[in-house]
Amino acid sequence: MTRPLLQVENLRVHFPVGGGLFSAPRMLKAVDDVSFKLAPGETLGVVGESGCGKSSLGRAVLQLIPPTAGRVLWLGEDLCRLDEDAMNVKRSELQLVFQDPLASLNPRMSVGAILREPLYSFEPGIARSEAEDRAASMMRRVGLRPEMMNRYPNEFSGGQCQRISIARAMISRPRLVICDEPVSALDVSIQAQIIALLRELQAEYEVSYIFISHDLSVVRHLCHRIMVLYLGKLMEIGPKRDIFDTPRHPYTQSLLSAVPIPDPRQARQREQKLIEGDLPSPLNPPSGCVFRTRCPHATPLCIKAAPVLEATGSEAHQVACHYWQDLSGDKQTKTPTGE
Amino acid sequence: MGFLTQRRDRQLAAMQAAGRTVGRSLWQDALRRFMANKVAMGSVIVLLLISFMAIFAPLLSPHSMEDFYWEYILVPPTLENGHWFGTDSNGRDMFVRTFYGARVSLTIGVMTTAVALLIGVTWGSVAGFFGGRIDNFMMRIVDVLYALPLLFFIIILVTVFGRNIYLVFIGIGAVEWLTMSRIVRGQTLSVKQKEYVEAARAIGLSNLVIVRRHVVPNIVGPVIVFVTLLIPTTILVESYLSFLGLGVQEPMTSWGTLISQGAANIDTGPWLLLIPGTFLAITLFCFNFIGDGLRDALDPEGR
Amino acid sequence: MIDTPTTRRAKHPETGGERPAVLECRDLSVHFDAPDGRISAVNGISFDLHRGQCLGIVGESGSGKSQTFLAILGLLASNGHASGSVKLHGEEILNVSRRRLDAIRGEKLAIVFQDSITGLTPHKRIGEQLAEVLTQHRGLGRAAARAKVLEMLELVRIPEAEKRFRMYPHEFSGGMRQRVMVAQALLCQPDVLIADEPTTALDVTVQAQILKLFKGLADHTNTALVMITHDLGVVAGLCDEVMVMYAGRVVEHAPVDELFYQPRHPYTRGLLACMPRADRDSEELTAIPGQPPDLEALPPGCAFAPRCPQAFARCEQERPSLQTARPGHLKACHLEELP
């Protein structure tokens, strides 16, 4: 493996919740002991349901929220140890695209000003004409007419706002862009446009993505590797093919079987492995394995001990389940493969 | 329902189809909507007229503030002798006095609001932006000050320092900024959650730049609305302080002082109460209409 | 009677006799009075709905899919106006008096919205709220109402219904609240249940549970279901028949298998081609170019023409009407046969 661009080790993000003057706050473990690596030009999908800590993970990597413990190594350098000024310099290499296209653009600034802002920030003293030229060419690159530079975000549709947001993230030529549900708020027909744009930009700029999404269909289409989170814990991580064809963790299996498939015959035939119940409160996670309360295979061991991440057949595919070997032994509900 | 947002999307597409390349900012949009509001625009004109008169009427009239016309005591309004609004029980010209009062009342309204604005915006935005302990501490101070009754506070000021117009400024300003700081804090908290503020952090901007460029411009709307509603409140507060004899002192005058004197002469010279009272009421109405108009213009979703 | 797929299918498969439609909608249009003119949101929608049938309504934002059914329920915004005819068991219900509508909405037509929390009063126990519907609409005694509510809560698979009966809405999770809403909608055994994006706000695993619940409805009750959604995956697994809407008009209306395997309208084909799938590796997605339609500036011809890869001169001048492509399959497109 080439030298990783990003290496996250035992990252924890805990938030104090509640707690008044006299009572100690409770700790919400948004991200709990998560480690992974990311190679240059790679796309890592982060999958999980609401409250699984996927957004907190992305923001902690960018140091937008301070990690409680662990290391975030960017080309070998620990970002958590940098002071604010040093981190701000690094930020040109790590950028972010948000879910809500309109809310991520300041409504009082013209699109041109929004796109020039990162340039002025990262390259102080840049000439206005150069900044304008670069903003214009970036607009063209994301499929917007540069003549629209003087317009304001409220004059663009959702899909166009997302293009602007992507342009702002890409204009400083970052090496990593964290995309937090970038297509979830868009219409189906517009989603595909944005996905295509992200792919083109990746090929052109050799940028890596951490693609945070709850939509497994989009993740399958866009990502090389996939990481499954549940209540802040890493459940399973591996190459896309392994995760989709031979999911080892019962949670991954139920996630996959819950995705609606736009194909009536297969939808009728498929046997769904649905899990019962709802997500437990992240403030009061179950002991042992956090998934045990909804897991059909849970045993007393799962209540006592939290499983550790272990490699399955290949080193790249790791799973945190006591019984993954037994589970993969019985007839695996392979997701129907269409072909 | 989602229909409003959908509509927005579609309006945008329409504008783009028309091929405009010059954008229209939210401010320009708001201005356009405000200009279309007839009541609010009318109020602006009336207020401008009153302000113009407040500045120039004492110059236009042949009479002056301090002149006593012993031969004209308690003359009703008339066009004949130049006392267009009549005279008071001391034979002073009411036209000049009314607009002189307007000058004082409006100044107090604007100045006090400016004081409240300055302290309130700074206090509220700092508390809201930094949050946590700082926020907690600053807002508890506000809570404590809130508990102080305004009238009581001013009576103390007056007994300690004597009657003085500046005390009125300080007294009202010291109370009104509290509400302002709460509003600003609330707005800052909500803007701070917005993703564009996070995006600004992600491009390495400092806190100061973020507050200046991304937070303040987005809280200005509600603040402007509050300011237009605060001005009439302070005018009213000043007038009842003056009515109680705690405000502006003779020979200076304000609408409150005039109303107070008019009330004393209500049997002999009802115009002494009616004229300044009417002007005060009109001014209050105008500010409120403008405030409403601004609110509608700045927040189109609320329509 | 006009020729809709439902009228074709109106012959009962076993008895061969005519089945009357529960809900007959003819030429329904909706427009809104906006400050800058009149916007027409829905144009000439017709369909029949039969007992036990599930009709899917698919469309993107601005397609008018929600407005159509809000109009049927008399729930349009105050500046909205509906015209046409909607008959429930042969009785005209469009634009009837408020009192009549209230009676109909309580007993025969029910709706489940996306944001379920707004449907429940926060300060009342769940059980009381649900029982109230029965005591007031049906004149049931308290004990009878309670028994009925418990039965419904069990039908929507709420665990420990007895205990939940005495809880407040905020004590329920999102998925659980949505179930309560379904239970409430079913209490009076409505003839038609309209579900407007009921799972959009939910996590995948919970969505799958709710969809399974809807699927089971047809077996337990005789309720006809209308599923309004933007997700073709939801429709594929659940519906018998699908209506695709674009810019306030129906562009295609067909049995579910035909729609997915032999789509006749370029928009439907576009939607199917631009959706990534979780169950197989998709080749490049073919995005539908352009922006969502602008209802205030619709072209004179086909509203989809500006984004249609196969549009020709006629499409820009003449609006295609909804015609029979095959028995039971309607489409609004000038193309005779798609390549």
Image (tube, coloured by chain):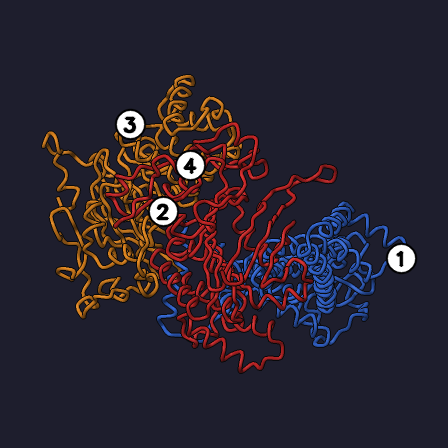
Label 3 packing within 10 angstroms: few (<14), some (14-19), many (20+) = few
Q: Are marks 2 and 1 in contact (CB under 8 Å)?
A: no
Same subunit, tags 4 and 3:
yes
Q: Are marks 3 and 1 in contact (CB under 8 Å)?
A: no
Q: Which mark is residue A245?
A: 2
Chain drawn in blue: B
Location of residue C49 by image quarter = top left
Label 1 packing within 10 angstroms: few (<14), some (14-19), many (20+) = few
Inspect the image, locate mark 3, and give the three-letter code of the amino acid beneath it: His
> How far apart, in angstroms, are the residues tagged by discs 4 and 1?
65 Å
Q: Which mark is residue C178?
A: 4
Q: Nearer the viewer, residue A323 or C210?
A: A323
Q: Which mark is residue C259?
A: none
Same subunit, tags 4 and 2:
no
Question: On the image, numbered disc 3 is attached to which residue?
Answer: C220
Residue C233, above or below A280: below
Under tag 3, what secondary structure?
helix
Under tag 2, what secondary structure?
helix
